[in-house]
Amino acid sequence: MKLLDGKLVADQIKSEIALEVKEQFLDRGIEPPHIAAVLVGEDPASMTYVSAKEKACHEVGFVSSVYRYPANITLEKLLEVIDFLNADDEIHGFIVQVPLPKHIDEQKIIERIDPKKDIDGFHPVNIGKMVLNLPCFLPATPFGIMTLLDRYQIDVDGKNCVVLGRSHTVGTPISILLSRKSKPGNATVTLCHSHTRNIREITSNADILIVAMGKEGYVTADMVKKDAVVVDVGIHRIPSAETKSGFRLKGDVKFDEVSGKCSYITPVPGGIGLMTIVSLLQNTLKAAKKEII
Amino acid sequence: MKLLDGKLVADQIKSEIALEVKEQFLDRGIEPPHIAAVLVGEDPASMTYVSAKEKACHEVGFVSSVYRYPANITLEKLLEVIDFLNADDEIHGFIVQVPLPKHIDEQKIIERIDPKKDIDGFHPVNIGKMVLNLPCFLPATPFGIMTLLDRYQIDVDGKNCVVLGRSHTVGTPISILLSRKSKPGNATVTLCHSHTRNIREITSNADILIVAMGKEGYVTADMVKKDAVVVDVGIHRIPSAETKSGFRLKGDVKFDEVSGKCSYITPVPGGIGLMTIVSLLQNTLKAAKKEII
């Protein structure tokens, strides 16, 4: 078994981006890529995530701004913020951290973002272009999975690939990306979800298994084909007396038993989570270079 | 075996639309739905298809216009035509018949269409909204398949569904629609294509088999599970001395042998082809009622 090491690849890509920022931007007197995040309210997970993004930006030499608003901001005011960020030439791309407070229609906010600055890849135009295999911003987690498979030269073409979970941010887009005529891609993809009846039978035939169910320890060794490639997108905080923080991070896959049976596996932590933030940096770089129009 | 009778269902839906046009539009003094088609050049298949659309429009009481241009029209001029149709309040929806001449960038034309008038459902915004399960114009053929399955109350939920072919107009969108959280939907979908290795093994496990390969007679009885539901999207003109026209229409499925083994099957002709045009009428009605914004 080999690890699909998200930390290793994320660090590699960050070095590559940092070099590109230096050579293509700073050394030429061009302003570096600038990413903004809109943070509404004080959800601890959102605040942690936005901080991690800021840290990653600083590591590669991007400019990073955070626009903070109270949880009682109105929809109209938040739409004005989006319009301002769309119009500001200094900001190359931005994200609106979800979840938003319940009184804000998330979809209205997402659709107001200029698709050219939509580095989260959540705007319907970017999702549609992804389906059509046109240049676009890919959603960060699926993009991260594709990058990790690509860097480890995992052969996806013609393989039976099973995706567990059909969320709009992970399962559905990764199933589309893997089956597209592209590299990596050209896999035969089966998308499973809560209504799937014979899930064990299906996973047992998977050459590549992508797990994004959101159920801690769901995938056990008996569900996995020998020498399969296993990608675990789940991330769960499990209380633990053995760690200083008081918790331990676990995935959707029972790593201890599955890792002995498969050829490659992503660890949790140190797998897809780190690739997600790097994807956002890659999208911002594309935005700054005006590669997506 | 029962037929999934596209003609029967198409006629039913056309009667329903005709009644709605009378009651909701004409009787209230409102202009009926108006559909326009842009036809470039003199491709015989395109001319036949546009005529069939005009005929269907007249049957239900829609207004129908055709804008004809020579094959040497410039991209700029064609974009102006799109802008004109986008702006014309009397036209509720329009299609640009493909294929376009080689010097015209089809994607540029499609992306210029106002998504609110994109009754073909080919604009990236509509495709993205389809993925996200938001109100949108569905592409006509997949929409027709879903309608046919729905009218025959075929139970799709939790079933193993296999789609052969990953085209942007049929295979890919129907695979997305069938796996969505919707009714019909919630199927476990496997999308197969030219790179799929074990295609017979996969089709043999399909409760529902959608065939959109574009290969005449590709699916044989030994590839189909007993009592499966088989939907044949293929349409091929086969020379024949026995018909007045000199040809016979055949699908991607060997109907004679497969029909004895399955529970339901679409005939060719008389199946999905007729449902496609009806889907376009349904989309136009939605456009006229401003249901998709």
Image (cartoon, coloured by chain):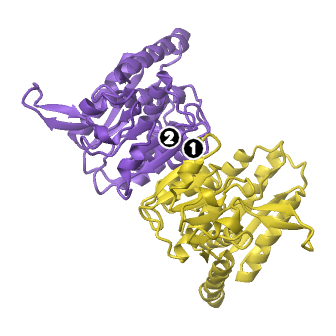
Chain colours: A yellow, B purple
Residue at x 72%, y 55% (from the top left corner): A83
Determine the secondary structure under disc 2: strand
**Mark 2 belongs to which subunit?**
B
Quadrant assignment for the N terminus of chain B: top left
Quadrant assignment for the C terminus of chain B: top right
Tell me the amino acid under the disc marked 1: Asn
The CA distance from mark 1 to mark 2 is 9 Å
Residue at x 61%, y 57% (from the top left corner): A222
Which residue is the extreme one toward the front?
A: A222
Q: Which residue is mark 1?
A: A198
Residue at x 66%, y 61% (from the top left corner): A120
**Mark 1 belongs to which subunit?**
A
Q: Answer few, some or many: residues within 10 Å of disc 1's Cα (few below 14, many 20 plus, some between 14 and 19).
A: few
Which residue is the extreme one toward the left?
A: B241
Q: Is residue B169 visible?
A: no
Tell me the amino acid under the disc marked 2: Asn
The quarter of the picture where residue B229 lies is top left
> Closer to the camera, A199 or A158?
A199
Q: Is residue B248 above or below residue B199?
A: above
Give the left or right position of residue B75, taking residue A289 as reference. left
Q: Residue A11 location in percent, x, y?
A: 67, 82
Between disc 1 and disc 2, the foreground one is 1
Tag 1 near tag 2, CB within 8 Å: yes
Q: Residue B204 location in percent, x, y?
A: 39, 43
Determine the secondary structure under disc 1: loop
Q: Is residue A49 above or below residue B256?
A: below
Q: Answer few, some or many: residues within 10 Å of disc 2's Cα (few below 14, many 20 plus, some between 14 and 19).
A: many
Give the left or right position of residue B33, taking residue A61 as reference. left
Badge 1 and badge 2 in a common chain: no
Q: Is residue A7 visible?
A: yes
Q: Residue A82 location in percent, x, y?
A: 74, 55
Q: Which residue is mark 2?
A: B160
